[in-house]
Image (tube, grey):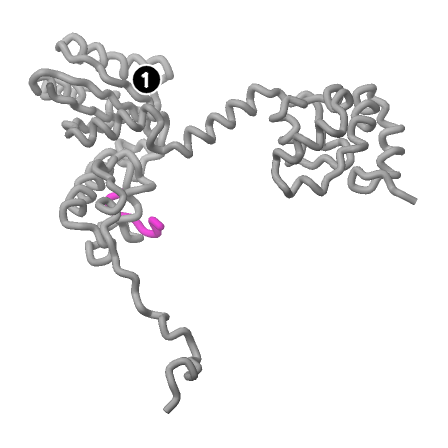
């Protein structure tokens, strides 16, 4: 039987193995989310301007709630749209 | 002691003075109510994400203030609601992280990149470009920028600088500029400073990329 070193793969066998998601607020110690910064908040929205779920962004529950509040504040001040197309 | 932050959008149709007085009037209102202002920030004209009252842009202001009780907030919001100049407003109470964030932002710890760029732009504004240095053979827009930041902004100054000094400036700009030979630049600059364009053209004919042809 051929050992693993001798087997030639057609593609990198490590492809497709996903990196573990993490909460960027916990990792980088961001404690306050500024509602006046649309460029930052847009990372948590999809192209229609809807909030992305935690399972996609990887946010912890604590910070997902804060993100949601910040985005809703930004929408009220017309910094971010309520509904749109092609936001990103 | 509670710290609040009120952000409001002023109608852009008003004249510049009217906009300033609108922002100032709320600062005065807060002061009269015994609040101490922490900061006022003019965020400038921004386009709105959706039209409000048929306007597509607005001028954003932020006032940050501390007060003993929250009694002033309903008064402030009532005044803003009645004010036709104000399109939107939002008052929030800052927690300790919010206070720290805003302090850091003001002292330039957050968003460092933006302030750094604006500082560079300011420096560039200080150094007025007197002559078009790219007119000289061998100097392109990038090298011209290097020379200008080094304080050499006219033909006269190039002609006074010797080639060693010019080489130093280029070396500081990065290794990409080491290939350039500034040997002929002072000579060229001298002609340009005397507006001797014909002999400059004749000299540049002989030069290739700023280097004298060795034949």
Q: Report in which chain the residue with disc 1 lies.
A: B
Q: Quadrant of the N terminus of chain B?
A: top left
- Does the image show residue B18? yes
- The quadrant holding residue B198 is top right
From the top left corner, tell me how far across and down residue B191 is, in percent. Answer: 84, 24
Q: Name the residue at 84% across, 26% down.
A: B197
Judged from this view, the residue extending furthest toward the top is: B32
Magenta portion: prevailing SS class = loop
Q: Mark 1 points at which residue?
A: B19
Number of numbered labels in the structure image: 1
From the top left corner, tell me how far across and down residue A72 is, in percent. Answer: 19, 40
Mark 1, secondary structure of its residue: helix
Q: Name the residue at 18% across, 10% down.
A: B31
- The quadrant holding residue B146 is top right
Q: Does the magenta stretch include residue A86?
A: yes
Left or right: residue A32 versus residue B207 is: left
Q: Name the residue at 47% across, 25% down.
A: B119
Q: Give the range drawn in magenta.
A: A81-88
- Does the image show residue A75? no
- Of the pair A64 and A45, the residue shown nearer to us: A64
Left or right: residue B188 versus residue A17 is: right
Q: In which quarter of the image is the C terminus of chain B?
A: top right
From the top left corner, tell me how far across and down residue B107 is, in percent. Answer: 33, 24
- The quadrant holding residue A53 is bottom left
- Of the pair B208 and B20, the residue shown nearer to us: B208
Left or right: residue B58 versus residue A56 is: right
Q: Name the residue at 43% across, 83% down.
A: A6
- Of the pair B8 and B65, the residue shown nearer to us: B65
From the top left corner, tell me how far across and down residue A78 is, in percent. Answer: 27, 36
Residue B201's place in the image compared with B157, above or below, is below
Residue B173's place in the image compared with B43, above or below, is below
Q: Does the magenta stretch include residue A58?
A: no
């Amino acid at each position: 039987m051929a050992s693993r070193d001798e087997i030639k793969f057609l593609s990198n066998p490590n492809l497709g193995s996903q990196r573990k998601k993490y909460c960027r607020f916990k990792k980088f110690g961001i404690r306050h989310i500024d509602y006046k910064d649309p460029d930052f908040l847009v990372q948590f929205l999809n192209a229609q301007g809807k909030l992305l779920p935690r399972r996609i962004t990887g946010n912890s529950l604590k910070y997902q709630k804060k993100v949601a509040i910040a985005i809703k504040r930004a929408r009220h001040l017309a910094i971010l749209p309520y509904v749109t197309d092609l936001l990103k | 002691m509670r710290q609040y932050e009120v952000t409001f959008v002023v109608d852009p149709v008003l004249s510049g003075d009217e906009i300033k007085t609108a922002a100032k009037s709320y600062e005065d209102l807060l002061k009269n109510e015994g609040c101490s202002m922490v900061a006022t920030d003019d965020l400038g004209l921004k386009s709105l994400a959706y039209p409000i009252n048929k306007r597509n842009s607005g001028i954003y202001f932020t006032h940050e203030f501390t007060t003993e009780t929250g009694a002033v907030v309903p008064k402030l919001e009532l005044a803003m609601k009645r004010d036709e100049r104000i399109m939107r407003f939002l008052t929030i109470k800052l927690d300790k992280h919010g206070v720290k964030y805003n302090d850091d932002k003001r002292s330039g710890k957050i968003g460092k990149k933006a302030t750094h760029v604006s500082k560079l732009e300011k420096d560039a504004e200080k150094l007025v470009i007197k002559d078009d240095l790219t007119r000289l053979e061998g100097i392109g827009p990038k090298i011209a920028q290097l020379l200008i930041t080094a304080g050499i902004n006219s033909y006269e100054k190039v002609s006074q600088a010797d080639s060693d000094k010019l080489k130093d400036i280029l070396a500081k700009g990065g290794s990409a500029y080491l290939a350039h030979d500034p040997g002929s630049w002072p000579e060229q600059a001298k002609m340009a400073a005397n507006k001797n364009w014909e002999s400059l053209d004749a000299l540049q004919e002989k030069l290739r990329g700023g280097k004298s042809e060795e034949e």
